[in-house]
Amino acid sequence: MHIVKMTACAVTMAITLQCCAQKSTIPVAADAVKPTVVTQPVAHDADDPAVWINAANPAASLVIGTDKDQDGALYVFDLNGRILPDKTVKGLQRPNNVDVAYSLLLQNKPVDIAVTTERYTHKLRIYSLPDMQPVDNGGIEMFVGDNEPEYRDLMGIALYKDKAGQVFAFVGRKKGPANGYLGQYLLQDDGTGKVKATLVRKFGSFSGKKEIESIAVDQRLGYVYYSDEGVGVKQYYADAAKGNTQLALFGTTGFAEDHEGISIYSLSDSTGYILVSDQGANRFRVFRREGNAAAPFEHPLLKVVDVSATQSDGSETIAQPMGPKYPKGLFVAMSNDRTFHIYRWEDIAGKELSVIP
């Protein structure tokens, strides 16, 4: 029996490496932006990063990245790209995406959390930060009652804290209906210092062409964005009380393959940039965050950035000083060589984009 398990693991690893090898045939552009740091590799398949900001010492902040495998993990890195074994969580069943929220009240104490989607168990897994201890009673099941099995295979996650201090999770799945593809869940203390989740709504249109994986929230403006792969980026209100009307569809042309990771760089409370991975071309397309009075939900393309990260699924952008290496913030992108690339925002911005003061 032991030999059978090892053989299955070997087959899984071989398939993973073969897929990576096939994807990595697209060459990186000669003038691609180079990262400041490349993390140590994860065991199987890097997919999505999040950043926890250490308020007392931003240079001591953490990058949390998923290892998307049946024998998966949440890897935790310092900003020098080193794996922190005492914080890394192993034994997860295909964790897909991850996000971070600050000051969720548990037993009346503010707790920062990292939340990942565990695809094969249909659960959210939630860990306190920075210690990465579980606060989820073994996981919280999502989309309970949906009959189609793949309608419960979890993928995307984005966290949103509203002005009242409530924390919500926007959760996507491998497949779903034409309407109501995403679920919005309220995260709260269950009375014992652990987290419970209550479904608030299902919303969001789906083209049916590929899937929806990447989700991002604009905390300050109150919008949620997601990539309908092969179609474009869709925008909705993050506040359920404002309704389920689609506000925008942008980025519909120019992508080589899939629309993937979305992240936001805030120049001010209302201005900045939305970055979207053009996965098949090893580049990110940068759109204007704000609209104008005549077209408040218009997001024109401003710049195309070739990066060294290949076939990038997930990304994260931080618009504040993060120590001497990253005085204007940073950008993290997954690369399909099992690593995450950390860039200075100035290098992404170049001469075309602005930086924080």
Image: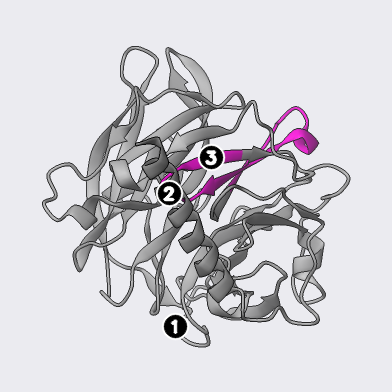
Instruction: Tell me, for residue 237, which label it has, or none.
Output: none
Between 340 and 260, the one nearer to me in the picture: 340
**Above or below — where is 155 with respect to 349?**
above
Q: Nearer the observer, disc 3 or disc 2?
A: 2
Query: Is any atom of residue 172 visible in this view?
Result: yes
**Residue type beneath disc 3:** Leu
Precedes in sequence: disc 1 or disc 2: 2
Residue 173 location in percent, x, y? 30, 55
- Residue at point 76% right, 76% down? 32
Q: Nearer the observer, disc 1 or disc 2?
A: 2
Q: CA distance from mark 3 to mark 2?
A: 24 Å
Residue 233 location in percent, x, y? 43, 71
Q: Nearer the observer, disc 3 or disc 1?
A: 3
Q: Secondary structure at mark 3?
A: strand
Residue 283 location in percent, x, y? 64, 75
What stretch of residues is rendered in magenta?
50-75
Between 194 and 299, the one nearer to me in the picture: 194
* Residue on which disc 3 sits: 74
Residue 168 location in percent, x, y? 38, 40
Q: Secondary structure at mark 1?
A: loop
Between 172 and 110, the one nearer to me in the picture: 172
**Residue type beneath disc 1:** Thr
* Residue on which disc 1 sits: 252
* Residue on which disc 2 sits: 7
Query: Is any atom of residue 268 visible in this view?
Result: no
Name the image colouring.
Answer: one colour
Quarter of the image that includes the N terminus: top left
Precedes in sequence: disc 3 or disc 1: 3
Between 357 and 322, the one nearer to me in the picture: 322
- Residue at point 74% right, 71% down? 353
Q: Secondary structure at mark 2?
A: helix
